[in-house]
Image (cartoon, rainbow, N blue to C red):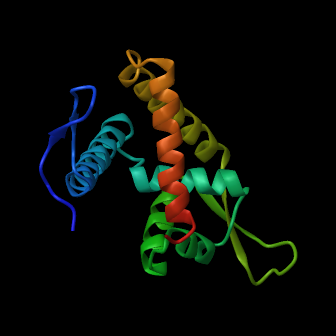
Amino acid sequence: MYSTTRHGDERGSVVLSRDQSVITIQRELTAFARRARAAAARMHPELSLVSFTLLSHLEDQQGCRATDLAAYYMLDKSTISRQIAGLEKLGFVERISDPDDHRIQVLQLTPAGTAKLAEAAELRRQAFHDRLADWAPQDLDRFAEYLLRYNSLAESGS
């Protein structure tokens, strides 16, 4: 077990123990997720963060099956079905028959879905630019590296 006290390092700055650092990371990632959901709701009330994520995935994959979305995001099929039904109702997603197997339905973005995704992505990109405007380039690079490292662990199942 690691200690949970703070102590100074050789430069005199405060260093957190491993346990305290993990607690801080957990708390801050939770706050980040909460802010992201709230910001998404303000920017596009009809396009939740989950919906934005699903639209982004469909764009990246150039369409896929609902079961593929459920597997990728480790969500129940009924959860994906509800989300997709909402996106279909908004006219952002449509189902087409797989050209190789007409029994399979592939989800793809409609032109309206592509436009809405581009609009939402630009607003979110601008919000990040604004929030990080005062960060030094090396801090941005380091932060990006840490996020890539953290998220690659999640994708590998660690």
Q: Is residue 106 shown above or below 125? A: below
| Image coordinates for residue 48, horizontal then vertical, percent | 39, 50
Q: Nearer the viewer, residue 125 or 105?
A: 125
Which residue is painted at 49% across and 79% down in the image? 77
Total number of numbered labels? 0
The image shows residue 100, relative to residue 5, as above or below, that is below
The N terminus - image quarter: bottom left
Residue 10 appears in the figure: yes
Q: Is residue 154 left or right of residue 69?
A: left
Please report the residue visible at 51 percent of the width from the left and 37 percent of the height from the top.
144
Check the image and report above or below for 33 versus 65.
Answer: above
The residue under the point 21% across, 26% down is 12
Quadrant of residue 18 within the rendered picture: bottom left
Res 98 → quadrant:
bottom right
Q: Residue furthest left?
A: 5
Q: Position of residue 143 (x, y in %)?
A: 45, 36
Front-lying residue, 20 or 58: 20
Quarter-of-image position of residue 139: top left
Question: Which residue is situated farthest in the right direction here?
Answer: 100
The answer, for residue 92, to whether it is visible in the render is no
